[in-house]
Amino acid sequence: MSARPSINIAGAGPGGLASAMLLAAKGFDVQVFERRSRVGGRTSYIVDGDFKFDAGPTFFLFPQLLEEIFAEAGADLNEEVEMVRLDPQYRLVFEDGPTLDATPDLDQMEREIAKISEADAANVKKFMAENAWKLEKLSPVLQKPFNGLADFIDPSLFSALPAVRPWASLDQDLKRHFKDPRTRLAFSFQSKYLGMSPYRCPSLFSILSGLEYEYGVYHPIGGCSAVSEAMARVAQRMGVKIHLDEPVEQLIFDGGKKKVAGVKTKSGEHRADAMFINADFARAMHRLVPEGMLKRWGEKKIETKSFSCSTFMLYLGIDKVYEDLPHHTICMSKDYEGNLDDIENQHRLSADPSFYVQNACVTDRSLAPEGQSTLYILLPCSHQHENIDWSVEGPRYRELALDRLKLIGLDDVRGHIVCETMITPADWDTDYEIHKGAVFNLAHNIGQLLHNRPRNRFEELDGVYLTGGGTHPGSGLPVIYESARISSNLAAKDFALA
Ligand SMILES: Cc1cc2nc3c(=O)[nH]c(=O)nc-3n(C[C@H](O)[C@H](O)[C@H](O)COP(=O)(O)OP(=O)(O)OC[C@H]3O[C@@H](n4cnc5c(N)ncnc54)[C@H](O)[C@@H]3O)c2cc1C
């Protein structure tokens, strides 16, 4: 064992990579083991011929947080990756009208909302101001670990309580400002970033739209995967060893106790003083921890938890560029609530689902050959459930997705497809090792947040820390990076490197 305390990390997703950078900066000797042949996990890329697509995230929010992590690692995010702030941030197409281009220019945004309701438009700035206040109150809460009830005796939390309104859903909370359900959706659909419905998502998450309007929606040139690659580059410059195609097969326990002493991979045993787990939490507990060892997060208990939705994906290489379609377009189904009920409660496929399209080449020509482009199509849907057999539904849903594109003005896509890749919830489950294909992890309801989420200093195994969307504060890139910061600060404190 080296003189410096050593840490193994299972997984080179955003959580694992941010942890690697921060732990190396604090003086740990870090090794990362990644099961796939590239870094980034869900924030990696898919290549099909000459076309490159982001696999998962396409909305890059609040880069300021990652800038801080890069600075702590002695690097500059903006030197590593070019970030473009988008305006319009995205287009919102309501199936029953109207179409809005969401912009951080609030005077213009009022005019856009006036297409729905003049009365709602008059409240846009007040809502934004309240959100800025909420974000200020909540930031300290999202930056600290929650290890137990003692952590609730904290002045930052008490001062945040009026902003949290734990009894209200996001949609209920927005009714204080906006009468028309479509306006409320324009400022609450962002709960989908957490894989949740605005009708069930806790009201505190209105800060997501606040983050967009206050700090911007960015596109990293090369895609969000370019950020993951930059993180790996910086970590390696700091001496972190990243082993690709090398899954952690087993945790090594010290004398049968709950102290993790290292990992077993195809190249042998790798002992270390501590361990970070970035692999999908539920899957990792199932695969890596012997049955019966865990009480709170054992296999049977995990099955009683609520999981996020999944996504059906098409990545299309196109032989032309749709110049009039903005970078991001979200189309809200006429029966938005019914679509969400199908996803979250009925676990069936809707006949007229909402969908999202990324037309990245209007911003970033590096992703496709000259004169051609990429279309990324995402339909939120149920996580894996016995009601849905994706080997049958996949091809049918592809046709439905292509038909639905007409709603956003794309009526000739079928004739321009050069290549395509499809990912269903079943593929997220098997190819990406994500429990139930629930790509946004454990659901973000109040009963599964803060100390009720698997904790950053994992409560059930000694010497284990969690990082990524499965732990506190939750899923979505900014908070995943924050989880890395919380967990690495805890490790530094535990090893007296703080
Ligand atoms: C379709 C989609 C769209 C999304 N859109 C957005 C968005 O626009 N904005 C946003 O902020 N977030 C978005 N997200 C959510 C989230 O930001 C990403 O999913 C993010 O990549 C999750 O990061 P993570 O570190 O928690 O896990 P992951 O990215 O899944 O990384 C975990 C890593 O662990 C590896 N691993 C698993 N098992 C093992 C093992 N046994 N040994 C070694 N390695 C292992 C995996 O291969 C993977 O590389 C989206 C997610 C998806 C799927």
Image (cartoon, rainbow, N blue to C red):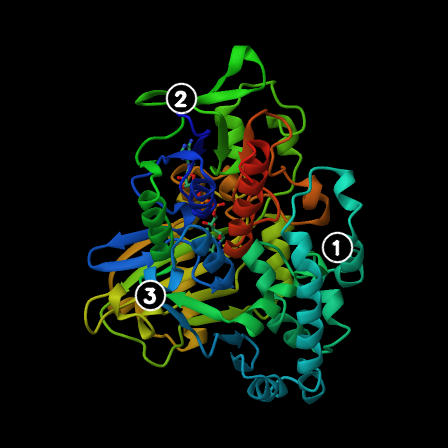
Q: Is residue 129 above or below residue 311?
A: below
N-terminal-most mark, 3 or 1: 1
Task: Sort mark 3 into few (<14), some (14-19) or many (20+) by Cα contacts within 10 Å.
Answer: some
Residue at 70% in and 83% down: 120
Disc 2 residue type? Met
Percent x, y of residue 233: 31, 49
Q: Is residue 186 above or below residue 309?
A: below
Left/right placement of residue 412 relative to residue 146 reads left
Percent x, y of residue 448: 68, 43
Say which of 337 and 251 sits in front. Answer: 251
Left/right placement of residue 175 relative to residue 36 reads right
The disc label shown at residue 156, or none: 1
Residue at 79% in and 59% down: 159
The disc label shown at residue 311, or none: none
Disc 1 residue type? Ser
Q: CA distance from mark 2 to mark 3?
A: 40 Å
> Tag 3's secondary structure?
loop
Percent x, y of residue 358: 40, 67
Looking at the rendered image, the disc whose residue lies closer to the viewer, 3 or 1, is: 1
- Quarter of the picture containing the C terminus is top right
Which residue is the site of mark 3? 221
Left/right placement of residue 312 relative to residue 137 reads left
> Tag 1's secondary structure?
helix
Q: CA distance from mark 2 to mark 1?
A: 40 Å
Percent x, y of residue 111: 59, 89
Disc 3 residue type? Ile
The disc label shown at residue 1, or none: 2
